[in-house]
Amino acid sequence: MNSINKLSINKKNTHWLKFLIGGIVFLLLLFILNLFVSPVRNSFLTLFSPIQKTFWAAGESSSGFFGSLLNSGSLAKENNNLKQTNQNLLAQIAVLQSIEQGNQAQSLVSASCQNSGFKLLMAGVTGLDDNDILSISKGSADGVAQDMPVINQQNVLVGKVSKVYKNFSKITLISNKNSVTNIKVQQSDLTLPEIDGVVRGNGGLTAHLDLIPINSSINPGDILVTSSLDKSFPKDLLVAQITEKIKNDQKPFQQAKINLFFDVKKADNLFVITNYKKPE
């Protein structure tokens, strides 16, 4: 009987011992796993982080791409609207500047021609052909007629009307090859006799001085103005300045190179003298 009781106690003690040992082993495993869980997690993240980064970057890129696609239409439309608005504003500024410049030109030339009694019609320059013929924006409907003189705002001779249409006209410049303009050399000493000559067009917006008597004294810097001998234009309009005289004692006349005062590149507005009448 005692032997049976002892055996029963020993079995119970063995179970408790196994349970205790199992608990200790379990706790030990938990402790070990706790020690290695961080390194394992680190290794895992280290191994897969490049892949994760790639997918994340791709996701961000695609998100931005699709976002830009969604917004590109509205942005492009907004950009076009801004450009159109800017162009409209620039066009309005250009028109206002042109009006202002035209008003200033009209004031200047009116003041300079007031004492001469000229009636002036302002016209815009619209074109130039290879034969030194200029187009202006006024025609017969505005009172322009053939042979009317044309000047700029500084009282510089430009040419004369050679052909008239209803809403525009053609101006033959004094640089045209067929143009011959009577001039006089303006001298500072009024006691000296006037020196008469002609300005002949060379084409290409240039001209030269011709038919100056061989014994007349002309010099670079001398100013040329229209002469009363030329009935096509009012007298004393500015024409050109001498740059170099060409003299040959074997010829009865001397010539000179000149710079015309009229500059086509700077011509925005010209003035037609509508009431000039040729002297009889």
Image: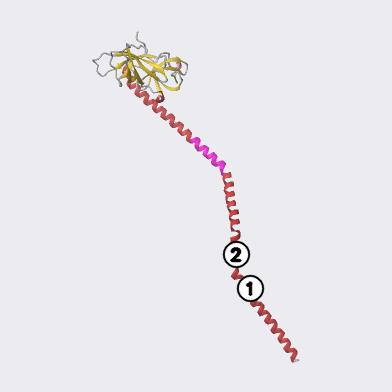
Is residue 279 in the magenta section?
A: no
Residue at image x 58%, y 64%? 42
Where does residue 111 sit, x and y in percent of width and height? 33, 22
N-terminal-most mark, 2 or 1: 1
Picture layout, residue 93 above or below residue 19: above
Vertical side of 45 occupied by 237: above or below: above
The residue indicated by pointer 2 is: 41
Q: Is residue 84 magenta?
A: yes
Q: Could you give the CA–CA distance between mark 2 and mark 1, rounded to whole angstroms?
A: 17 Å
Question: Which numbered circle lies on residue 29?
Answer: 1
Please say whether residue 119 is visible from this viewpoint: no
Residue positioned 59% across, 66% down in the render = 39
Residue 279 screen position, x and y as percent: 34, 10
Farthest residue in the top direction? 280
Given the image, on which type of amino acid does mark 2 rest? Arg
Which image quarter is the N terminus in?
Answer: bottom right
What residue is shown at x 58% (from left), y 49% (from top)?
A: 61
Going by the numbered disc 1, the residue's amino acid type is Leu
Marks counted in the figure total 2
Which quadrant of the structure image shows residue 158?
top left
* Quadrant of the rendered image containing residue 25: bottom right
| Residue at the bottom extreme of this rendering | 2
Q: Which residues are magenta?
A: 71-85
